[in-house]
Image (cartoon, grey):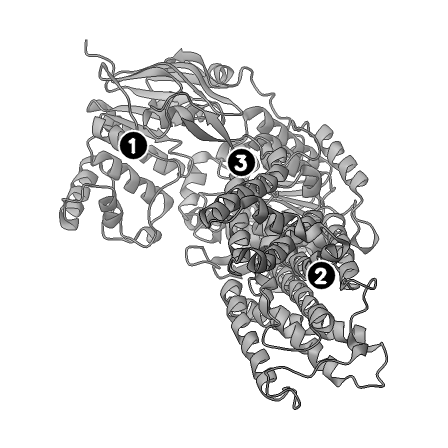
Amino acid sequence: MFKLEPRPQASKFWSYGSPLLALLITVLIGVALFIALGKDPVKGLQVFFWEPVKSPYALGELMVKATPLLVIALGLAVCFRSNVWNIGAEGQFIIGAVAAGGVALLAGKETGRWIVPVILLAGVAGGMVWAGITALLRDRFNASEILVSLMLVYVADMVLSFLVYGPWKDPTGYNFPQTRTFEAVTQIPRLMSGSRVSVGLLIALGGAAALWVFLFRTRAGFAQQVGGLAPAAARYAGFSSRKALWVALLTSGGAAGLAGALEVAGPIGQLTPYVPAGYGFAAIIVAFVGRLHPVGMVFSAVLMSMFYIGGELAQSRLGLPKSITGVFQGLLLFTLLACDTLIAYRLKFTGRAT
Amino acid sequence: MSPPRLQLAHITKRYPAVVANSDVSLTVQPGETHAVLGENGAGKSTLMKIIYGSVKPDEGTVAFNGQPVQIRNPQEARALGISMVFQHFSLFDTLTVAENVWLGLDKSLSLKEVTARIEAKAREYGLDIDPGRPVHTLGVGEMQRVEIIRALLSNPQLLILDEPTSVLTPQAVEKLFVVLKKLASEGCSILYISHKLHEIRELCTACTVLRGGKVTGICDPREESNASLSRLMIGAEPPALQHRELKTGATVLSVKMLDVARESPFGVDLHDVSMQVRAGEVVGIAGVSGNGQRELLYALSGEDTRAKPGMIEVSGQPAGRMDPRQRRALGVHFVPEERLGRGAVPLLGLAHNLMLTRSEAIGRGGWINLKTLERQALGIIARFNVKTGGPNAAAKSLSGGNLQKFIVGREIDANPKLLIVSQPTWGVDVGAAAQIRGEILALRDAGCAVLVVSEELDELFEICDRLHVMAKGNLSPSIDRADATVAQMGEWMSGLWHEDVQARLAAIAMAAREASDVQA
């Protein structure tokens, strides 16, 4: 029989190997799932892992979806590393999108390109304000940031609905719940023609680099993480836990808001009730699969984006329901959590069962 | 002759990183008080857990009353007649004494019956306890009595006590020994785990010494000296400390009528705590833990900033409201009692742990210079003889003694004006303890003011120039080490210093009057 035995020291090998093993197990379960549903597993895998990378256009689409995931996950990594559990990035994303959309709606025919940075800043500010509510309630009243941030997602959803069904509804839109399409000048600049990839991708990669520097090369980043690793040590050192809380929530809120702005002023181009696509929740998985490490999250964001695209393709090609995306995302998170056991423990064969 | 109460033969227990017990044999006779002596990490606790069934040995056999047994869990141990009193109590603060005992018993009894039994046992052994009191109102000594009564209710044939005196005043230790001697005279065997040599020599009739998981000696402690026992325990005697003459300078720390309300419901309020620490002296605070030491240290280190500014002065500057970083800028460095999680971040490397209190490697804009940081860590590792895998080894990978050396080294290396150390050698092996005490004295000789809070009177007597005692949130006046006795310190730990102080004041007044009479 096998036995789990604690390792004397956490395994370096498995802290990198675990996400790969988790991915492998996810694929295997996926294959079993395709077979059980009566689909050709080879075709199924192709849809998820080959179609999204087979052409420059497909690769572009992959990046389009990976961008918001990465931006949000970078912010969440700051939170989770400081032991602040912001589960409501989705809500901050929505309010960021609303704020950015509000500014975009102000643009007219004669507005200059300066409106784009204003839109992005509005998105950041919107996300910060929304996360700031959570920070304030936690700081002043010690309310659980997990519950508050999560509940605020639904409030944010209501705010968006109120606006697009009410005051911001396009008067010439045949009563559809959506704003008018933003002026072309508000469009986030694209990197190249023929692809929807925008400067958002550069912002995301720049953000990953900035996060790396912050976490591993500055005292502020060190102090932030000590608060998460050992709160008593942070108090002993004199690192303020209140500051850490605010920094964590404002950073992740700002990042999520920025992602919202990049989405509405990028691929979407207007506000609709369908702006929230679950990126805020998926980014939690991205953050953990990427080990809360800036480089790791770049890879995991691409992977999660594959699942999004694969799920959409699976609908048309294989006739599978859309929820297949969620199934794969969930599978990956669960197998990762299981595989992480190997970091602190090793399997030992103990001979026959006793 | 009856068979031995307990016989362990060739017990071996391996853990991934360490062999906790290697070929350990141990025989306990009926009615014998048998000491298991060894340093921290010598394998005493593992051995007891094997006897109590919470750890399974890899090799070896256990026999109880001559019968070979396999004890798979503590329930089976208790069914055999083995009871254990752990070092850390497992009592629920919000329940009463009787309810706590009831939780661990056969559920067929009613609470009333349990109460009656507790009272009967308490009378029988002279253990004074009120079954109706909630546990959080009890002192540490009383909590231990609850644990002992709980253990005795099952009428054990073998009672295991793990470091039972570490939380007791000297007077409470005396009372405990009376109970244990009575138990032994009734035929109950006792396994007494400790590293306090004089206690073992006073109480025990046999002794097994462990070092590095192996048995290094079996003896009758009554025929041994502290020196011979400590040689068995650590292989060598630690060098005696040199205590040079006192050259005190200006007052560095001045605490004036410090009053702080408790932060947690089970904490202690500080009442009018006043003291001074001058440059070049070591001042000690004795007392049983949980009497306000923790709260006092939080207030002194800046982890608690609720004191009024003037209540704590550092070199004449009001510091009561300063945070730890501001106090460090004034030269106040602090070594907390919890090494992992407070003094160091367990998962981070030693070099990074420097940044908790040191900022030499931090450049403009908060940029961390990793090379400088590593060099600094290597310097401390070398200077304080820290055994570690390197400057980037995680703090939790170090043994307690080595991590303590690193943390003490980190603070001493900062050339503090005032060093505050809590429990400097708690859970540290004898060699490292001697080194740490030596470093503290060297720092004092270099003109630093040092404040040491410790539960170990021996240690305080060894390194301090003046002593205070803390009891129930009050601080006694200070007494020169030369004038202090263990018995008196014990009395003071119960808060009974007022009469002593009055008597001394009267004596001083008398002497002054006589002097003036002579002059006249």
Q: Could you give the CA–CA distance between mark 2 and mark 3, rounded to whole angstroms?
A: 34 Å
Q: Is residue A205 left or right of residue B75?
A: right
Q: Could you give the CA–CA distance between mark 3 and mark 1, rounded to whole angstroms?
A: 30 Å
Mark 3 lies on residue: A342
Mark 1 lies on residue: B74
Chain assignment, label 1: B
Contact, mark 2 vs mark 3 (Cβ under 8 Å):
no
Point out the image quarter for the N terminus of chain A.
Answer: top left
Residue B411: x %, y % from top left: 68, 41
Q: Is residue B112 left or right of residue B239?
A: left
The amino acid at mark 2 is: Val
Asked if residue B468 shows in the view, the reply is: no
Q: Residue furthest top?
A: B1
Q: In the depicted view, which residue is nearer to us: B59 or A147? A: A147
Mark 2 lies on residue: A64
Q: Which element carries disc 3, helix, strand or loop?
A: helix
Single out the mark in the foreground, 3 or 1: 3
Q: Which element carries disc 1, helix, strand or loop?
A: helix
> In this rendering, is residue A300 above or below A241?
above
Q: Are marks 1 and 2 on the same chain?
A: no
Question: Which class describes the residues within 10 Å of circle 2: few (<14), some (14-19), or many (20+)?
Answer: many
Quadrant of the rendered structure where residue A128 is? bottom right
Asked if residue B117 shows in the view, the reply is: yes
Lower position in the chain sequence, tag 2 or tag 3: 2
Q: Is residue B106 left or right of residue B406?
A: left
